[in-house]
Amino acid sequence: GHHIDIIVSKSLKVLGFIKRNTQLFNSTRCLITLYNSLVRSILEYGVVIWHPYLFNDILRIERVQNKFLAFAAFKLNIPISSHDYAPIRDLLNIETLTARRLKADHKFLSSLLSNSIDAPELLSSINFRVPLYATRNPSSFSIPTRSTSYGQNHPLYRMLHSSNSILL
């Protein structure tokens, strides 16, 4: 969508700035700090609300990080095979942006349920699943079905569905 276009464009511009101005850098920690504070912050700002659900959008966002990983591998003389960024990601201890979005969702939901976030209207729209008898389904939340992809990917329902999946 349009929002993803803006985020990807803005983060690529900042990544280009980092590439142009770090020609003499050889510190891994410094490069990662610059990426995390200047680029990843753009990619993750407000992600609990606008979390992408289309594969194409997820891929476009992840490509920004992959461009940084390729740059870091080049700067630090780390050999990588073409288009496999997992080894460099592991070496630099950088998670995928998808994994970070899931963690952000779980952190937000945990904060909401523990009253660390004061949002009674949001909390009141969570339906807990309380079975009348023993069942094999350990899901904690009852999620209403939605007829549209947009409705199914509502931020709160996405978080509840993700939490139910982890519990299984």
Image (cartoon, rainbow, N blue to C red):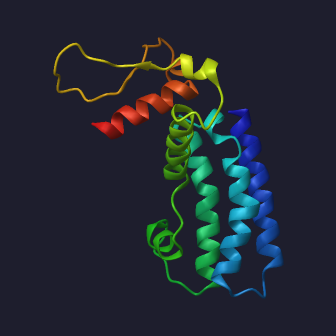
Q: What is the x, y in percent for residue 12?
A: 74, 57
Q: Position of residue 63 (x, y in %)?
A: 60, 56
Where, by quadrant of the figure, is residue 46 drawn? top right
Give the residue displayed 49% in from the left and 32% down from the top: 159
Quadrant location, the N terminus: top right
Q: Nearer the viewer, residue 78 or 104?
A: 104
- The residue at the point 17 percent across, 22 percent down is 135
Q: Residue furthest front?
A: 115
Q: Report the front residue among 135 and 21.
A: 135
Image location of residue 8, percent across then percent down: 71, 49
Residue 27 spot, x, y in % from top left:
68, 85
Q: Is residue 100 left or right of residue 138?
A: right
Is 14 drawn above or below residue 92 in the view shown?
above
> Quarter of the image containing the C terminus?
top left
Q: Residue 72 falls in which quadrant of the image?
A: bottom right
The tally of labels here is: 0
Front one among 126 and 148: 126
Of the pair 82 and 143, the residue shown nearer to us: 143
**Dividing the picture into quarters, in which one does residue 73 lie?**
bottom right
Relative height, residue 155 to residue 105 (above, below)? above
Apparent side of residue 41 relative to residue 152 in the rendered image (left or right): right
